[in-house]
Image (cartoon, grey):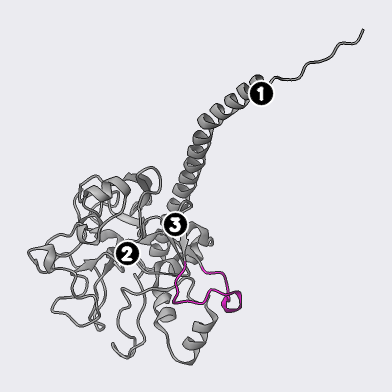
Amino acid sequence: MSTKQSAFTLIELLVVIAIIAILAAILFPVFAQAKVAAKKTQDMAHMKQTGTSLMIYSTDYDDLFPLQAGRDCDAAANGLGTWNFNSRVLIPADWNIALNAVQASGCTSRVKGAWGLPQNQIYPYLKNSQMFAIPVARDETSSSFDYSAANKKVEPYRSGYSMNGLLTQLSQTAITSVSTTPLWWPGFGTTNRVGNTYTNPFLICADPNAGCVFNGNGAFFGSAASCNNQDNHNTPGFNNGSQSKMGNVAYGTVWAYSKSQNWVFADTHAKTRRTGTGDSKNDPFVADPTYLASGFPSQALTFVDSQCHVPIFRPDLQP
């Protein structure tokens, strides 16, 4: 005698679907968190290797840190040009065919200034441009450049990290606390700049005839409101390196990994640093409500000391 196998009832099917939905709701966030954690670990390893490469470069160049940028195209400083300390230059310097032609026939600061950029200087020691990028960051191109395949000599680098510009051309031995002085940090929040970048923060070096090195013995300006007003390459009334400035921080949230970022320090150790601490020795930005709620920093609420430097980046800062 044959038996007829009964099918699932509608109620049983709905129960199974409900169970699957519940499991998905529980497990998908776990999988997402695991994926972010894996990227964070990978990023930490990349940062440490980048920091180590930068220090090897420094050892090969009399223990001096790289330049924050190269020179401009004007005829100042015996034809060398003014210091190109606050404008976007190419990474790598030769990826853009059209600008290569301009450089060959004359000069463009986008290429000439790029020769001194830290990413371009340390690349031979790193051999992997992917380590300049933040894995969880969005890529941002610029309307100033042609990214078409026909205009690419090589693929442009993606870079979300920046060297601490206050270390430019400084001796390793001049750092007060190597374990707390930032060497490499996410200077553009969670944005990878594609094919172009600058060092952030940067030293203001408007005198083309003088070197560009941190000066911690500069004048006291009394208040932050008096600072950072001479970054337009006009020769100011103060020595090179006695002021510094953060670049444009209108790049969105700085939260990369659950309200935190990866940093590497001058002793080449890397660590995850929480944002929004309200402590000028641990965060470049004041912990205002918007920054605490969304991770969006404010240009007007950057910590600045009376010597016009962002305290956390000072190489002479006592921890």
Q: Is residue 24 magenta?
A: no
Query: Nearer the observer, disc 3 or disc 1?
Result: 1
How many C-alpha atoms fall within 10 Å of the one at disc 3: few (<14), some, or many (≥20)? many
- The disc at residue 286 is none
- Residues at marks 1 and 2, CA–CA distance in whole angstroms: 58 Å
Q: Is residue 239 visible?
A: yes
Instruction: Compare marks 2 and 3 and give the one earlier in the sequence.
Output: 3
Horizontal and vertical percent position of residue 129: 51, 62
The residue that label 1 is drawn on is 13
Residue type beneath disc 2: Asn
Query: Nearer the observer, disc 2 or disc 3?
Result: 2
Rendered view: 27 above or below 58 = above
Q: Nearer the viewer, residue 179 or 33?
A: 33
- Asked which secondary structure carries label 3, the reply is helix
Q: Nearer the viewer, residue 55 or 307?
A: 307
Q: Which residues are magenta?
A: 141-156
Q: Is residue 146 magenta?
A: yes
- The disc at residue 200 is 2
- Asked which secondary structure carries label 2, the reply is loop
Look at 29% across and 89% down and name the residue there.
76
- In screen coordinates, is 207 left or right of 255? left
Rendered view: 47 above or below 38 = below
Residue type beneath disc 1: Leu
Q: Is residue 282 visible?
A: no
- Residues at marks 2 and 3, CA–CA distance in whole angstroms: 16 Å
Instruction: Compare marks 1 and 2 and give the one earlier in the sequence.
Output: 1
User: Pointer 3 and pointer 1: residues touching (CB < 8 Å)?
Assistant: no
Outermost front residue:
10
